[in-house]
Amino acid sequence: MLRTFGVLKWGKGEDRPQRISTTPIGLRTVLRDSPIEGITVDAMVEKFTAVSDHASKVRVNASLLANYIFIRSLHDDDTLPLADQAFFTACLSCCRSADTRCTTVKQRFAEFSAATGIVAYPSMPGTTRVFENQAQDMATAANTFIDVHFGDRRLTLVKWGLKVMLRSRVTFTQKVFERRIGELCTFILSTRSEMDVMAAIREELQRLGFIGCFDIVEQLCAITVDFYGSDYPSKLRHLLELQELYLADDRLRFDAINRAAYAAFPKLYPEDTNKQARKAMLDEWTFYADPRNTMSPLPINHNTATFVRLCKKSICELFPKLKVCIAAGDPWWFKAIIDPFSSKAGIPRLRHEFNKYARSEHGMFAAMKMVRDGKDIPVPWMIGPSFETDGKQRRLQLITSALDHPGAPGFLHLHEAGYNVSFIDTTLEEVLEKGDGVYNLRHIYTEAGLQGFDGVTVTPMDPGQKLVAAGAHIQGEDWRIENAADIMFGDHPRVTFSGVEWQTKTFTLKSQNAEKLRRRADRPYGQALQQLQGERKNTCDLATFTKYCTTWNATSGAIWAEVLTSQRRGHRFLRFRAIQRAVEEVAERFAPIKGGKEKYGRRIIMFEDGIWKPKKGCPAAPNKKIVRAICQRSATVMIPAAWGTKTCLGCGYENSDGTDYRTRLCTTSPGCLLHPHTPTIEINRDHGAVGVLGVRAVYVISRIWSAYRDWRPVGYNM
């Protein structure tokens, strides 16, 4: 229907990309009693919940079986299978007592069952199509694991191997050592040929100060540069080989020290008096950094209620009587069981005036007739061919044309390309005129220089951990290097959203406290988790993985009895909605729209694109969701994060650590604009990062490249 609508509106030759949006909503909110007796809302909710429960258990066991097959193949030095949909279909079939024609997987399942005690669950009728969809999702996750993360994981393994080999051979400070190891990794993993790298590696080591270290790193370099595989099994085997050679033993020793420390001095509540004694034991790990976690060959599914994807065929399998009221090829088949257009559902896009044509086939044909007659009607939002549910909430897929509903510039590709959201050079004036969208710093410029920001409110936004975000609303004409002291200490409107506020409003603290109580209570659930704590599932060692699976088999009953409850599902939906509200509150605080956008004039957000792992006790705020919300309110520019909090706004040199964790110390004297009359100054690190972020963005967009020493982001040329 959408394709026909597009042909009538734009012609056959026009490229008509689709825009897809997922709308989470309560399951009972959109369900309706079907015309068939006995298929009521309660019956459907009960059925969907049972299917989700069954799929959750089968998926976890199937992911363990798939990893066992890969680990066994590595152990026996056999060819790794291709982790495609057919492979995961066979694994799922073995774990749910269904037939499969893949004899190899059946044989491996028999070995797996004998070694671990995990047996197949009884088959559930009418779920064939459901598990075909599950197999497709598992194959996509496995391939994404290699496609997206191969380069980063390879870099991590090579960097760790080099750190351990070279740290004792040099006297660099930790910061200098980290930088030079990074340069060495970049050289080894470059696009040069193997011959060129091996010929020049000795000279590169000399240049970086690693004198006489070639013999130590020769094997690692040879293994790394000798890899040319492009298929999934080859890439995976290469990663696992690097992991076993350079990371696995270190991680095992580190975990052994941790287990011994916590066994001797367990964590106490509410006051942990064992902390210092435990820290003394943990100091047995003498290396300055903790080793990264090892990985399993394939992703292992979490033990939680899974979302099952249901399409027309799977619904007809689960409820055979519905076949009489669901016509073949009918895009509105869903109307037999759900009513997403109702006021009760309250989905704004579907309730819009122009979307009334999408409610029925008759309405769509009437709309297409009007388009054929020359009337300009927007392409409506239509319900996608499938939806997902866990028995409590429902994820509806809405589809329309990206030509009529493009969203903010860069918005459609935010989920695909991360922060690589713009690819064409754009002027600052065009960005401000549009008033929304997300862009990369390297693609924005102005010929007007610094005067191009006059009359524009520039808001740098520094995401963090103690503070989810910090920023300041400062007029564009004030963003000058000579105004560094005023930017840092002046009376400008500052905006923050604290980590504690985020944890409270998203029910994070409430969830953590409730989980602690459940785990500490003398119940089967807490006991099961304690048994699993000492086991390792992210490993490539056959004996270790088999031991984990055996323990999982003994404890899974108690865990599933807890995590598949209706209360757990309800709380997950409650937290999801709370996070959505908190994201909008962050966006409103930094880019307000209450009272209309015009009220706030021309403005632009400079968002730091730093990525980091949250520290213990700090909230894991979803930065990409925050960007998604803000870019629909104001033009948003992604700024490289390097040297944000560590660089002084007044002189451009690196700051030292201050007396407090939240401060930095500048010792440049004379020459720093922040303390021209004193030898040092201690500054708030968040205020410093905001100032650095704003000045860097303004000067780079204005094409004043000499604003800071060596601060040009990757991709800029003089």
Image (spheres, helix red, strand yellow):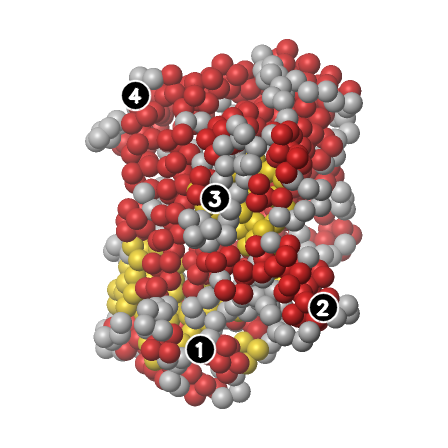
User: How far across and how far down the image is residue 349, in percent?
Assistant: 50, 59
Residue under numbered circle 2: 8
On screen, residue 267 versus residue 381, left or right, reads: left
- The amino acid type found where label 1 is placed reads Val
- State the residue at coordinates (72%, 36%): 84
Front: mark 2 or 1: 2
Q: How far apart are marks 4 and 2 (CA)?
A: 64 Å
Label 2: which secondary element: helix
Q: Identify the mark at residue 521; answer none if there is no mark.
A: 4
Check disc 3 and give the amino acid type. Answer: Val
SS of the residue under disc 1: helix
The tag earlier along the polypeptide, 1 or 3, is 3
Residue 698 has which mark? 1
Reading the chain from its start, which is encountered first: label 4 or label 1? 4
CB within 8 Å, label 2 to label 3? no
Please tell me whether mark 4 sits on a helix, a strand or a loop: loop
The residue beneath circle 3 is 30
**Residue 175 seen in this snapshot:** no
Q: Is residue 185 above or below residue 233?
A: below
